[in-house]
């Protein structure tokens, strides 16, 4: 069963079609990469899938619910309960420690649980850095905290926007290995990227051009390199 389906989705700003009649289906447990040049509609698509914007036309079905018809308050609830967001810019609260940044996400979902937050940090190899501020963490460590933060509320979908854009090769591989573990556990992953190596880690790549789906590429080597 598809976790996500975009049906004839368009996003129109005046005379500009940021997305133009897009049809995409993502199955539960699938790992999909979204690629395309600047202005191709990647960010617009991410905002719509992530319940941060609505399409001008078409339907967006998330776990069977057409989120394009939901009011803003409901979209906030759906994003909180079903989606884990990871960004290129880390968006950590600068005066909170790593574990406190994760607990903030718990607070907006249900109830903060420090031990659970520490376990999330342990999963990404950073429990010993739990009491460090963002300024005391490397870029790679901050991104791993963001992965832990995205996972803490057990979302059905991880939506990552250029998650390795600010990382060196070593930390990029660490993040991709974490994504591989999540995929093996059945998590659905959508990764927006400009990096062909990041896209090649996914099962399937959807390429956007001028707001349309130009092509889809199946990774025949998926799972062989990680």
Image (cartoon, rainbow, N blue to C red):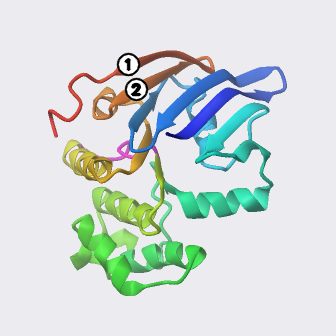
Q: Name the residue rendered at 32%, 79% in the picture.
A: 118
| Label ID, residue 205 | 2
Between 222 and 194, the residue placed more toward the observer is 222
Residue 120 left/right relative to 37: left
**Residue 177 at x, y = what percent?**
23, 48
Residue 160 vertical placement versus 215 (above, below) = below
Up the image or down, 223 lies above or below 23; here it is below
User: Residue visible at 45% across and 58% down?
Assistant: 90
Residue matched to label 1:
217
Residue 25 in view (yes/no): yes
Which quarter of the rendering shows the C terminus? top left
- Give the percent coordinates (x, y) of residue 180: 26, 46
Q: Are marks 2 and 1 in contact (CB under 8 Å)?
A: yes
- Which of the 4 image quadrants contains residue 140? bottom left
Does residue 143 sit above or below 67 in this rendering?
below
Q: Position of residue 171 (x, y in %)?
A: 24, 50
> At 20% from the left edge and 35% from the top edge, which residue is drawn?
223
Residue appearing at x 50%, y 71% in the figure: 93
**79 left or right of 138 in image:** right
Most frequent secondary structure within the magenta stretch: loop
> Magenta segment, which residues?
160-168
Counting residues from the start of the chain, the first of labels 2 and 1 encountered is 2
Is 177 on the left or on the right of 84, as rendered?
A: left
State the residue in front, 8 or 46.
Answer: 8
Query: How far separated are the C-alphas under marks 2 and 1?
Result: 5 Å
Q: Quadrant of residue 145?
A: bottom left
């Amino acid at each position: 069963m598809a976790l996500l389906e975009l049906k004839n989705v368009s996003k129109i700003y005046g005379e500009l079609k940021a997305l133009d009649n897009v049809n995409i289906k993502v199955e539960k447990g699938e790992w999909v990469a979204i690629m395309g040049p600047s202005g191709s509609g990647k960010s617009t698509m991410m905002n719509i899938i992530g319940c941060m914007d609505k399409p001008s036309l078409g339907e967006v079905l998330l776990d069977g619910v057409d989120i394009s018809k939901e009011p803003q308050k409901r979209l906030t609830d759906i994003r909180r309960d079903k989606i884990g967001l990871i960004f290129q810019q880390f968006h950590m609260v600068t005066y909170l420690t790593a574990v406190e940044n994760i607990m903030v996400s718990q607070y907006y979902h249900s109830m903060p649980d420090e031990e659970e937050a520490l376990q999330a940090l342990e999963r990404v190899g950073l429990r010993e850095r739990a009491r460090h501020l963002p300024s005391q963490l490397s870029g790679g460590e901050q991104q791993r905290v963001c992965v832990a933060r995205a996972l803490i509320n057990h979302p059905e979908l991880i939506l990552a926007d250029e998650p390795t854009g600010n990382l060196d090769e070593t930390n990029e591989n660490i993040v991709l290995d974490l994504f591989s573990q999540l995929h093996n556990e059945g998590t659905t992953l959508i990764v927006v990227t400009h990096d062909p190596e990041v896209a090649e880690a996914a099962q399937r790549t959807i390429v956007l051009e001028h707001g349309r789906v130009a092509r889809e590429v199946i990774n025949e080597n998926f799972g062989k390199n990680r």
